[in-house]
Amino acid sequence: MPDPTIAYLRSPQAIRERCGQLFDLACADQLRYFRCDLDRLPAVADYVLQVTRQHYSDLNVPFHSRWRHFEVGSLPRLTVLEAQLAALSPIAKAKAKFDLAIVSVLLDAGAGDQWQYRESETGEVFRRSEGLAVASFQMFQQGLFSSDANQPLQVDAIALQQITEATLSQGFQASATNPLVGITGRTELLQKLGQTLTCYPHLFSSITPRPGDLIDYLLTQTQNNELSASTVLAAILEGLSNIWPGRITFAGINLGDVWHHPALSPTSPISPTSLIPFHKFSQWLTYSLLEPLQELGLTITGLDHLTGLPEYRNGGLCLDLGLLQLHDRSLLQQAHLPGSELIVEWRALTVILLDLIADTLRQTLGMTATELPLVKVLQGGTWTAGRQIAAELRPPHGLPPIQIQSDGTVF
């Protein structure tokens, strides 16, 4: 049985509860860096709805997942992938899609404002998340993550452990004149993924473990052809816990995207009561694995048990539109580490505000959480609106309002 503290800090319940504690302090104007202005909530929700209708006029919004980024530009990549996987069994096809999604999401930390990727087939240029998605898709197609030349469309532990920074830089077209933020961190993340796949045989059970082996485990967790989103998240948090660098540990376990905030417990050393979990990458990955599971005929339950993603587009939306306000705006001129008190506050408040935006949208539209789950609000939605307002306020690249010293493994 897992340690109860670790089990709690890995739960969506803990994310909302701990973020809620900081939110209450912000509403009472008792945080060091941020305050909330909930009078701005209706206007922010209206802006999100306007952006959603621009992209999905019928409000038939897909999930916020990595698969959306593979669809950019003129090349029908997913159609090509389906044709390449057509001869496989449904489970083997789902494993290949898990392989692709897991590696691509783990490579999706902020790229910086100078990097771009030119797709050889089309000549089209992509930046940021879309550029990282297209580049990782192409690397997957080329068999860069497979140790078996006869099975290029897979990701396995051997190939991941052997990947080098030079190889990954070449795949991303990164160079001194086309710099990609965090290329060393990304390389080490994939190498650690290759190592950790061998440590959890109940999750990744094949002779040469693959991320896609997680399919077999998740199928054992279904009941009446239903699988909860929280079960998928729990498997990811267990199976990938060892890959995150420089994180807080408890009882010898790497906690991952979990950070200290002194307002919750000012004692030293850091205590479990002062820790705020976010699990941004793990939840983004969970959202990105749900569609291959649905293609197997599974019904995904408990979508809204997961939280919104505390990253710079969603958080930037709240700050740019005044829902969040900095006490000292001169801090916008500095870069901040992911574990800094300011960034932890920004992320925690974003989690709660995303729930409030979603509730406001549902009330406006007369829709239920089942009809408009949070994963669709993000896509429609807050992430897209965050990018749009950033582009309007800070052209040409739409930089986030707060500068982050990224290592390629958090944002």
Image (spheres, helix red, strand yellow):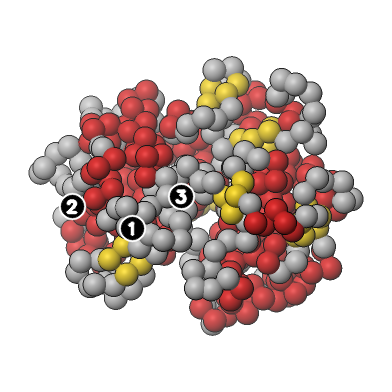
**2 or 1: mark nearer the eye:** 1
Question: Please, what secondary structure does the residue beneath circle 2 have?
Answer: loop
Query: Distance from label 1 to label 3 (Cα)?
Result: 16 Å
Mark 2 or mark 3: which is in front? 3
Q: Residue at x 51, y 46 (%)?
A: 406
The residue tagged 3 is 109
The quarter holding residue 251 reads: top right
Measured Cα–Cα span from mark 2 to mark 1: 22 Å
* Residue at position x 29%, y 76% in the image: 74
Within 10 Å of disc 2 (Cα), the crowding (few <14, some 14-19, many 20+) is: some
The residue under label 1 is 178
- Of the residues shown, which amino acid type is indicated by label 1? Asn
Q: Which of the two discs, 1 and 3, labels the residue nearer the N terminus?
A: 3
Amino acid at pointer 2 = Gln
How much space separates mark 2 and mark 3, taking CA atoms? Answer: 22 Å
Decide: marks 2, 1 in contact (CB < 8 A)?
no
- Which of the 4 quarters of the picture holds residue 374? bottom right
Q: Which residue is mark 2?
A: 142
Front one among 292 and 153 = 153
